[in-house]
């Protein structure tokens, strides 16, 4: 009975897949003569021998008339490891922003996969804001949650909703609503009276901001703030999975909030 049949040593199998991932990837396109693997992967003959022996031990490869080939198990593991590696690369690329968020933040891998990161750099602190403004400026409808209210946000949403008829549904923390009433009362009333804006007030703390835009270019942006409320950057994505995740998050917070005005 082989190791695979007995179900033993899954960690050793995984270690072999990681160690020999280059060989699995090379064989994914079809059988390759063993002697050609050395040139294709630019490794020594002894390395090829050891790799083939290890992969054969776990029945991930087999010898055919055309050369060495992946077995069904080998193809499955090559595909799944490739997918995992892609996810790991996305997480690694975005972890500088992810690390700012609370550890229990409800951020799905669907947002991170293929996401674009836009940082507030020292030399360009407003870079994320410009991208944010571009997204909202092109939108017909916006769904959003926010723990802060930057002056730029207030002016942008007022102009787009009151002046241009963009529809907006916003879930805001209670202190944000109080700030808008105190400092931007006239603009807030105009926006609510336009019949294009609905605002919900939330008693709990939001771990991040989130904007979903529909229109000329659909997309979602996770807005990352530090514990002082300073903008650190955006994670943006436009895949259907990311959009679905973002809408679900928005609806979850909206259900917990109280409508204070709007249709």
Image (spheres, grey):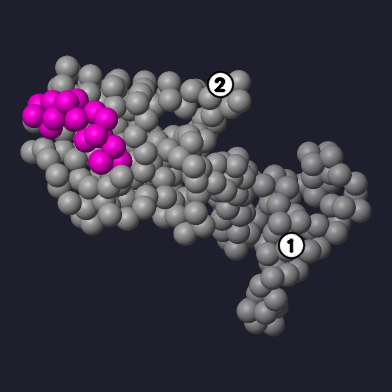
Disc 2 designates what residue? 124
What secondary structure is marked by label 2? Answer: loop
Residue 137 percent coordinates (x, y): 30, 20
Where 237 falls versus 151 (above or below)? below
Q: Residues within 10 Å of mark 1 (few under 14, many from 20)?
A: some
Where 222 falls versus 10 (above or below)? above
**Of residues 190 and 165, which is closer to you in this image?**
190
Q: Which residues are magenta?
A: 176-194
Residue 68 percent coordinates (x, y): 73, 53
Q: Nearer the viewer, mark 2 or mark 1?
A: 2
Residue 193 lies in the magenta-colored region: yes
Disc 2 and disc 1 in contact, CB within 8 angstroms: no
Residue 251 can be seen in this image: no
User: Which is the main secondary structure of the residues drawn in magenta?
Assistant: helix
- Locate the N terminus by quadrant: bottom right
Q: Which mark is residue 16?
A: 1
Where 118 falls versus 55 (above or below)? above
Where 134 falls versus 221 (above or below)? above
Q: Residues within 10 Å of mark 2 (few under 14, many from 20)?
A: few
Residue at 71% in and 52% down:
21
Q: Residue furthest front?
A: 182
What secondary structure is marked by label 1? Answer: helix
- Viewed as shown, does residue 142 lie left or right of 235? left
Residue at 24% in and 34% down:
182
Residue 212 percent coordinates (x, y): 31, 36
Residue 226 can be seen in this image: yes
User: How far is the residue under mark 2 from the one under mark 1?
Assistant: 45 Å
**Of residues 103 and 108, which is closer to you in this image?**
103
């Amino acid at each position: 009975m082989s190791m695979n049949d007995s179900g033993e040593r899954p960690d050793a199998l995984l270690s072999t897949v990681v160690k020999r991932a280059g060989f699995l990837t090379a064989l994914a396109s079809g059988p390759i003569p063993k002697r050609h693997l050395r040139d294709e992967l630019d490794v020594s003959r002894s390395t090829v021998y050891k790799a083939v022996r290890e992969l054969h031990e776990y029945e991930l490869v087999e010898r055919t008339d055309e050369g060495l080939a992946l077995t069904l198990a080998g193809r499955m593991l090559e595909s799944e490891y490739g997918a995992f590696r892609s996810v790991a690369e996305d997480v690694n690329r975005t972890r500088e922003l992810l690390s700012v968020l609370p550890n229990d933040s409800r951020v799905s891998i669907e947002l991170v996969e293929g996401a674009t990161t836009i940082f507030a750099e020292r030399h360009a602190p407003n870079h994320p804001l410009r991208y944010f403004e571009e997204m909202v400026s092109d939108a017909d409808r916006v769904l959003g949650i926010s723990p802060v209210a930057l002056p730029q946000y207030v002016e942008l949403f007022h102009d787009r909703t009151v002046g241009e008829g963009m529809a907006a549904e916003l879930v805001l923390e209670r202190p944000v609503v109080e700030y808008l009433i105190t400092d931007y009362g006239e603009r807030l009333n105009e926006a609510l009276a336009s019949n294009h804006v609905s605002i919900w007030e939330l008693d709990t703390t939001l771990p991040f901001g989130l904007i979903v835009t529909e229109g000329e270019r659909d997309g979602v942006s996770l807005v990352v703030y530090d514990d002082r409320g300073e903008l650190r950057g955006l994670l943006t994505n436009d895949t259907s999975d990311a959009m679905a995740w973002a809408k679900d998050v928005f609806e979850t917070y909206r259900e917990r909030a109280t409508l204070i005005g709007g249709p």
